[in-house]
Image: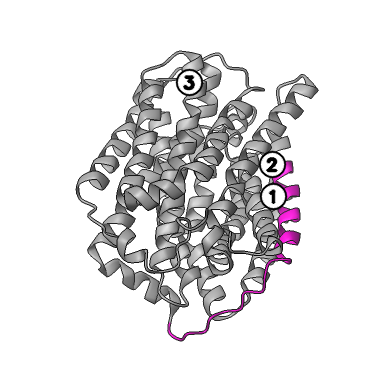
Amino acid sequence: MSISLDIYIRLSLVMFFEYAVWGAWAPVLAARLLGPLKMSGKQTGWIYTTLPLACIVSPLLAGQLADRYLNLEWILAGAHLIAAILMFVAVRQKTFGTLFLAMLGWSFCYAATMPLVNAALFTHAPAASGKVFIWAPVAWALVGYSLSGWRMLRKAESDGTDAMMLAAVLGLVTAGCCLFLPSTPPANTGGDAIQQAFGMLKQPDFLLFIVTSLCVAGTMQFYFLGSGQYMMNRGISGKAIPGAMAMAQAAQAIATWYALDWAIGHLGFQWTLVIGSGSWMLLYMIYAATAPRPILVISQALHGLAYVMFMITTQVYAGKIAPEGLGGSMQGLIFAATTGVGLFLGTQLAGFAMDKYSVNGKFQWPKIWAFPLVITLAGTLVFATLFKDNSPKKLAEKPAAVAEGK
């Protein structure tokens, strides 16, 4: 890595806690909403919609602020501090309306931080970003296993508040770590950064990339909303579910370290995205086929592989083609498309499917999983046949973000 150990540690700590906060509650909150709080699939969908809604707006605004007005690290620290306070508020809410408002406020703050962590990485350590990204899945996995361990020690099923409290505490820690990031002042290159980033959509390949990516990314909400309840319905203990789902992050960590650099460098963005979308397609195929429980647990690794080869690859791609001085805004654009519009539409579709295919309180899971299966199949075919991007060769002349991180 062509980066000092000091800078690497600072960036890695922020990357670790950034995703530990999200990973503390996202995989398991649906079980609290559908279980102890007795919310409907539609209401659960709306709670999970808060982050996608925020990601449509907050990443773009945060990118504009970082590219034109304020130091990036100040924005990160302030947003995480306010988000942590709001999560403490959310822990105590038991009705749909109050919990929705608390999570919406948390999401607007947290969504502003997601693209800026990447922007800091691509600014200060482009040659080592693969080795910094590794801490995101490690954090998610450790949080999942820690939560499972805590619940097993208590020898009781949890009502889900432990996950939210953990997210709030981790948010405070993240805010402190952000203050120690390398100074990243705004570039101030002139013009409206958001408008310039949206100008990239005039390029046909990039437009196709954005539209297809948001559709495929949206299927993650089926995974997050449905997997926990699906596993319990298949006879897997609720205490074991966080650990089982954390297998995805273990696989993500391995794939980030060993496979991502090779895939982008040798296969290019097109086929790396095909692998990512295809991995989700295979996961939903296993879900829809009602595979045996051991295969169901092992298949969680496919989500981790898909996240690396698809979601992280979209972020690396946006970082590499970002015009000078628009790093934050380009990361904001890709997050707005995938984690924003994509997950918003995915949440609505998942909530609709879970309500439509629920009979006497029992979900008809094969029919529910057919939705993301068809979408990921279509996305995989689009990337394999229509996305004819040559940017890996052209971008090899520019500083590489992950391909050089060896």
Which one is earlier in the sequence, the residue at label 1 or at label 2? 1
Calculate the distance from the C-alpha at mark 1 to the C-alpha at mark 3: 32 Å
Task: Say which of marks 1 and 3 sits in front.
Answer: 3
Q: Position of residue 184 (x, y in %)?
A: 62, 74
Local crowd at mark 3 within 10 Å, few (<14), some, or many (≥20)? some
Task: Say which of marks 3 and 2 sits in front.
Answer: 3
Q: Determine which residue is flagged by label 3.
A: 296
Q: Determine which residue is flagged by label 2.
A: 164
Calculate the distance from the C-alpha at mark 1 to the C-alpha at mark 2: 7 Å
- Position of 224 with respect to 95 (left or right) is left
What number is the disc on residue 87? Answer: 1
Q: Secondary structure at mark 2?
A: helix
Amino acid type shown at disc 2: Met
- Position of 93 with respect to 349 (left or right) is right
Q: Which residues are magenta?
A: 165-191
Q: Residue at x 42, y 16 (%)?
A: 291
Calculate the distance from the C-alpha at mark 3 to the C-alpha at mark 2: 26 Å
Amino acid type shown at disc 3: Leu
Is residue 271 magenta-colored? no
Which one is earlier in the sequence, the residue at label 3 or at label 2? 2
Residue 41 visible in image: no
Q: Residue at x 38, y 35 (%)?
A: 279
